[in-house]
Image: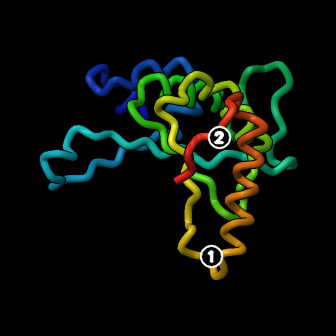
Amino acid sequence: GPTLIGDPDMGFSGLRAFGPNLIHHVQLKIRKNLSEELKDIILIDSPGMIDSPTDSISYVGSGQGRRDRGYDFEGVTRWLAERADVILLFFDPDKPGTTGETLSVLTNSLAGMDHKLHIILNKVDQFEKIHDFARAYGSLCWNLSKVIPRKDIPRIY
């Protein structure tokens, strides 16, 4: 974390503004022997968003985000999203809701990023019945329609 954020050539030094708790959460993993096409790609995997009402207690007025993170998760998400070419937002079928932190990230951190946001319903191969898939897909569409200010919901992959 400190090495990655401290190296001006890596492009992540702006994350220092979010404090030491974030710096110590960041990890760099380098994959070697990749094809030439993949050598300049950087993937960032963020922690899952907190959608349980009992887990999403905020510091009131502190601007520090969620209690258990210790840094401004929404601010970090916005900082990274502004620099990303593509944003992949994964939803698990058993939790297709957009409540708590997900709602806030979609309406605040990712506002204006529609052109690079791709929504993915993950683990669809685990459905045993098409009815279960339809229920999860419908629930995700319904929840997204509440938070994305568009006439049509974006394509869900």
The residue most toward the front is 151
Q: Residue at x 71, y 62 (%)?
A: 136
CA distance for labels 2 and 1: 23 Å
Mark 2 packing: few (<14 Cα in 10 Å), some, or many (20+)?
some
Mark 1 residue element:
loop
Amino acid carrying mark 2 in the image = Ile
- Horizontal and vertical percent for residue 89? 55, 45
- Horizontal and vertical percent for residue 73? 63, 32
- In the displayed structure, 118 sits above or below 20; it is below
First in residue order: circle 2 vs circle 1: 1
Q: Nearer the viewer, residue 73 or 124?
A: 124
What number is the disc on residue 127?
Answer: 1
The residue most toward the bottom is 128
- Horizontal and vertical percent for residue 39? 19, 43
- Which residue is tagged 2? 153
Q: Residue at x 51, y 23 (%)?
A: 79
Q: Nearer the viewer, residue 31 or 154?
A: 154
Q: Is residue 19 visible?
A: no
Left/right of residue 49 with respect to residue 15 in the rendered view? right
- Horizontal and vertical percent for residue 62? 78, 20
